[in-house]
Amino acid sequence: MSADSTDFTLLPDLAVRSLGGAVIWANDESFAERENLIRPEESTYQPATFGHKGQVYDGWETRRRRGDEGAHPESDDCDTAIVRLGVPGVIHGVVVDTAWFKGNYPPEVSVEAIAVEGYPSAEEIAELDGWVTLVERAKVGGDSKNPFPVDSARRFTHVRLRMFPDGGVARLRVHGVAKPDLRWLDSGPFDLAALENGGLVADCSNRFYSHPQNILLPGRAQSMGDGWETARRRNRDNDWVQVQLAGEGVLTMVEIDTSYFLFNSPGAGALTGIRADGTEVELLPRTVLRPDTRHKFAIESDEAVTQVRLDAFPDGGLARLRVYGTLTADARARLLAEREGEVA
């Protein structure tokens, strides 16, 4: 990533509901539900749409804070929501999106994080000490995306958003790199490309209609919009996406899923492995792909690779990419050392 403070938004949102994130606790949600914070789609608004609590907002909105006898609350009063990340990870930045909140957004916010083992209750997590500040109390604008880069190499499982003193936030995006439990990765062959296992889109040729990170999300796509679709290509080149695997591994199977892409799927695809030294190895030769189909191909190579590149000929859309295999001993040792360093 470059020095641009918003480059971190190209990384996956670890908090998004479609990755398994959940808003597990909030001290108040009088006007609008906390769960809206992590919905994958952009916030929407319909003017003069009133429910029994007032104007309906697509976000999290709390009551107006009041001190004794209606006095303005003290400056350190705040409303709080806690989000369990869909997968633990290293956070590179957060976006506090106040879309459509114009006269009722919080003047200031802060963001903290913590790493929790096991499955304690939401109430227990809310009472925990040891929260680490990622974003110091900072001013935010209304009806805008407010990005905050984060400089931390630690692995976290939960984040805590605080609004000073109250108000509404449409979406909370927590961008970073997944760092799952190594015990899960040791349980047998797994999808080394999956976001939840630590995979990541490193680069791509085009993201005109949708982001390529979508193809690494868990579960099946629910519509064409859940995948990655490129613009129509008007030259002799082809589109491609390059994926950083969870670690160096030997691959055994690839699934190229074109579900819901009926008239705009690629005509063919090829998979290339990239070794740690940057050299390449063919894993799947150029092969015909069918629309709206889950294609499964065996990989007959014992070469260890750290990245894969999927070439789509000439362009089109993909729903999901799954790359199954096992970590090498060196990769597992590096991940274990990394995790031990985070715990220390």
Image (cartoon, grey):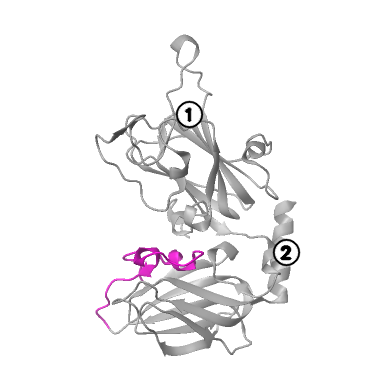
Residue in the image at 52% along x and 66% along y: 200
Residue at (37% x, 41% y) in the render: 58
What secondary structure predominates along the stretch shown in magenta? loop
In the rendered image, residue 227 lying in the magenta stretch gets the answer yes
Q: Quadrant of residue 305?
A: bottom right
| Distance Cα–Cα, label 1 vs label 2 | 39 Å
> Would you say the residues marked 1 and 2 are in contact, meaning their CB atoms lie under 8 Å apart?
no
Is residue 137 in sight in this rendering?
no
Give the extent of the magenta segment.
206-235
Mark 1 highlights which residue? 164
240 on left or right of 247: left
Upstream in the sequence, badge 1 or badge 2?
Answer: 1
**Foreground of the two, 58 or 231:** 58
Q: Which residue is mark 2?
A: 336
Is residue 311 part of the magenta span, yes or no? no
Three-letter code, disc 1: Phe
The dot on residue 296 is none
Q: Quadrant of residue 253?
A: bottom right
Where does the image place residue 274, in percent across and percent down from the top left? 54, 80
Where is 314 relative to 12, above or below? below
Determine the secondary structure under disc 1: strand
Q: Residue furthest front?
A: 52
| x and y percentages locating residue 29 in the rendered image | 46, 33
Q: Secondary structure at mark 2?
A: helix
Residue 138 percent coordinates (x, y): 47, 34
Q: Is residue 188 left or right of residue 295?
A: right
Please indicate, yes or no, whether residue 271 appears anywhere in the rendered image: yes
What residue sits 38% from the left and 39% below the top? 98
